[in-house]
Image (cartoon, rainbow, N blue to C red):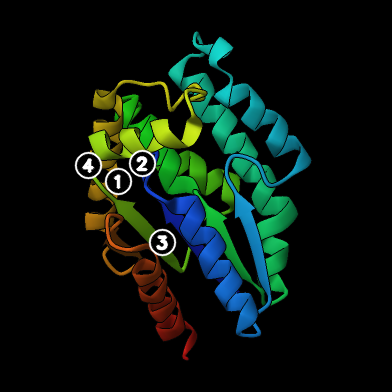
Amino acid sequence: MAGFFLTFEGIEGSGKTTQCTAVAKALLAGGRDVVLAREPGGTGIGEQIRATLLDRKNDAIAPLTELLLYVAARAQLVFEAVRPALEAGKIVVCDRYGDASAAYQGGARGLGIPLVQELNRIATGGLTPHLTVLLDLPASEGMARMRVRSGGRADRLESEPVAFHERVRAAYLELAAAETDRFLVLDSRRPTDELTRTILGAVGERLGG
């Protein structure tokens, strides 16, 4: 496949969306053909699933139901947007991907990372990112950032206790340790511009300049 697949991961408040936008903007300015996507969402079907998953009224959702909805949204995003863009030689920059389900549902919800990875493999046809940036910080700091950002309007996952997000963080670090060639782990407390430059440098190395 001719394109390049870049994903961003991290707990709530880690700055993923900020870096996704900054990196995509810089790549576009450099003459690259870029598609910016997000999970869950990025398609009409995916956005409907997103609304269901993040609605605080749906607090009775079972962990397995939650996982399957995320995987369904992911399957649609790959089918409709990601794979066609990569086949056209474009750079896809995605705010969350399969590792998010491995960390949140596999790790924090206790469903097991291997189960999630197998479902991801089926849903995406085995499509794996070329580079995954994990923006890491303590859960307590991430939640503090999130509260400021949301202005008291946290969604269902953002409303989980700090202990839940600590488990998410631990699962992310476990995933990164298992695939050091794919993951770039960065302290998200570093200055925003510095993080963007570091990420662009890593992308440039993999793209050959």
Q: What number is the disc on residue 3?
A: none
- Identify the disc placed on residue 11: 2
Q: Is residue 128 something that shows in the picture?
A: no
Q: Position of residue 62 (x, y in %)?
A: 47, 14
Tell me the quadrant of the picture where the N terminus can be found: bottom right
Residue 15, percent from left and from top: 41, 51
What residue lies at 59% left-to-right and 49% top-to-bottom? 38
Q: Secondary structure at mark 4?
A: loop
Disc 1 element? helix
Which image quadrant is residue 36 in?
bottom right
Report the disc number at residue 138. 4
Mark 3 or mark 2, earlier in chain: 2
Q: Nearer the viewer, mark 1 or mark 4?
A: 4
Is residue 38 visible to us here? yes
Q: Mark 1 to mark 4: distance in Å? A: 12 Å
Say left or right for 85 vs 69: right
Residue that appears at 66% across and 74% down: 90
| Proximity of marks 1 and 2: CB atoms separated by less than 8 Å | yes
The reply to whether discs 1 and 4 touch (Cβ–Cβ < 8 Å) is no
Classify 10 Å Cα crowding around label 1: few (below 14), some (14-19), many (20 and above): many
| Residue labelled with disc 3 | 132
- The residue pinned by badge 1 equals 172
Residue neighbourhood size for the residue with mark 4, other residues' Cα within 10 Å, grouped as few (<14), some (14–19), many (≥20): some
